[in-house]
Amino acid sequence: MKKVVIIFAGLGALLSNPLLAHPGHDHSASGSGLVNLLWLVPVIVAAVVVVFKEVTAPKR
C-alpha cells in the first residue's frame, strides 16, 4: 500500500508541475508581494499560536 501511495504522489508531483506555471503568474507585478504575504499569514499565525501555547503551558 505504501508503494502505491508513493507512486501516485510522485506522478502527481511530476504531472501537475506544468499546470502551476500559467502565463498570468507574474512575480514582478506591483501587488505580488502583498498577495504572497497574504498567503503566508495563516502559517505565521499558526506558528505564533503554537509557540504561545508552548510558552504558557504549565511545566510538569
Image (tube, rainbow, N blue to C red):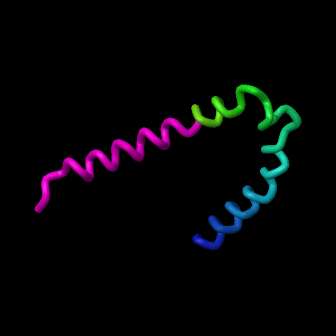
Percent position (x, y) of residue 9? 68, 61
In which quarter of the view is residue 30 placed? top right
Q: Which residues are magenta?
A: 39-60
Would you place residue 30 above or below residue 5 in this image? above
- Which residue extends farthest bottom? 3
Looking at the rendering, in which quadrant would you find the C terminus? bottom left
- Residue at image position (29%, 45%) is 52
- Which residue extends farthest top? 31
Magenta span includes 57: yes
- Depth order, front residue of 41/8: 41
Q: Main secondary structure of the magenta part?
A: helix
Looking at the rendering, in which quadrant would you find the N terminus? bottom right
Magenta span includes 35: no
Q: Relative to 49, is 60 on the left or the right?
A: left
Q: Relative to 42, is 27 on the left or the right?
A: right
Percent position (x, y) of residue 44? 46, 42
